[in-house]
Image: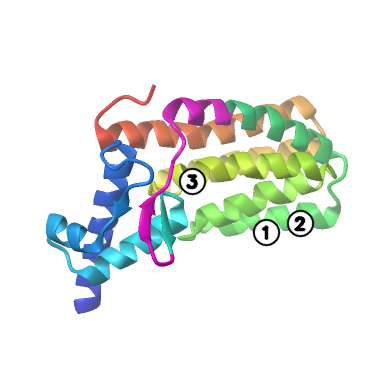
Amino acid sequence: MTDNNSSMKSLQAYEKIRDMILSGFKFPGTRLVLSELEEEFGIGRGPIIEALMRLDRSGLVKNIPYKGAIVATPPKQKEVIHIYDLRVDLESKLAVEAMENLSASDISKLEKLHATMEELPKNHYHFDRQFHCLIYEASNLPHLCNIAQALIQSVESVLNIYRWEKEHCIKFNEEHGAILDALKSHDPEKVKKTLEINIKGGLKIIKETYSKMLRVPFE
């Protein structure tokens, strides 16, 4: 019971700090002082430390030795939209290049990843990333793959903080199945279209959840 209570308090602290950062209440570079957060939230130090560690993993906070937790700089709303436009263009090109290079072994790996995601694991996003990375690496265009990874990582801090609902995962699984079918059919236009739908699905989640959470429109 004590562990559950601590986990709940850690989640509360995480959500409160996350919302303050995304709403602009805590500016980039601001120190997140433990004693001040304890007093403000009425939550003990342990759960707050856990929350800050989780926020560090998401990219919204940087835990710096001897300085403590500092608010990182998440991408602005306008940047997120531009990043997704760039992702659609670049990742579609990589997938089309990869289409002719994917071996039977690669397709088998993609099918296994897809099957794992259909079981709706808690770390669904982790397998999602593996699925896309495997495709892009088969393009044999490593420099462009690095750029694609940088673009994905730049919005990862925003995307990772949202809880993917079960229906989101089911929808993404259907889209991954369509991408796999398009790759197998060697249809470049179908590959581009299915990837665009899947990538923009992530942006849609960000828009919907951001607007709901902060009660302001994502423009």
| Residue at left offset 76%, top offset 36% | 94
Q: Is residue 7 visible?
A: no
Pick whichever, 108 or 65, lies toward us. 65
| Residue at left offset 15%, top offset 56% | 41
Q: Is residue 201 left or right of residue 45?
A: right
Tell me which segment is drawn in magenta: 65-84
Q: Name the residue type under label 3.
A: Ile
Task: Where is residue 55? Give x, y as percent.
Answer: 39, 55
Which mark is drawn over residue 108? 2
Q: Is residue 73 visible?
A: yes
**Quadrant placement of the C terminus:** top left
Q: Is residue 36 left or right of residue 49?
A: left
Residue bearing mark 3: 170
Q: Residue furthest top?
A: 219
Task: Where is residue 156? Give x, y as percent.
Answer: 51, 45
Residue bearing mark 1: 112
Dot 1 and dot 2 residues touching (CB under 8 Å): yes
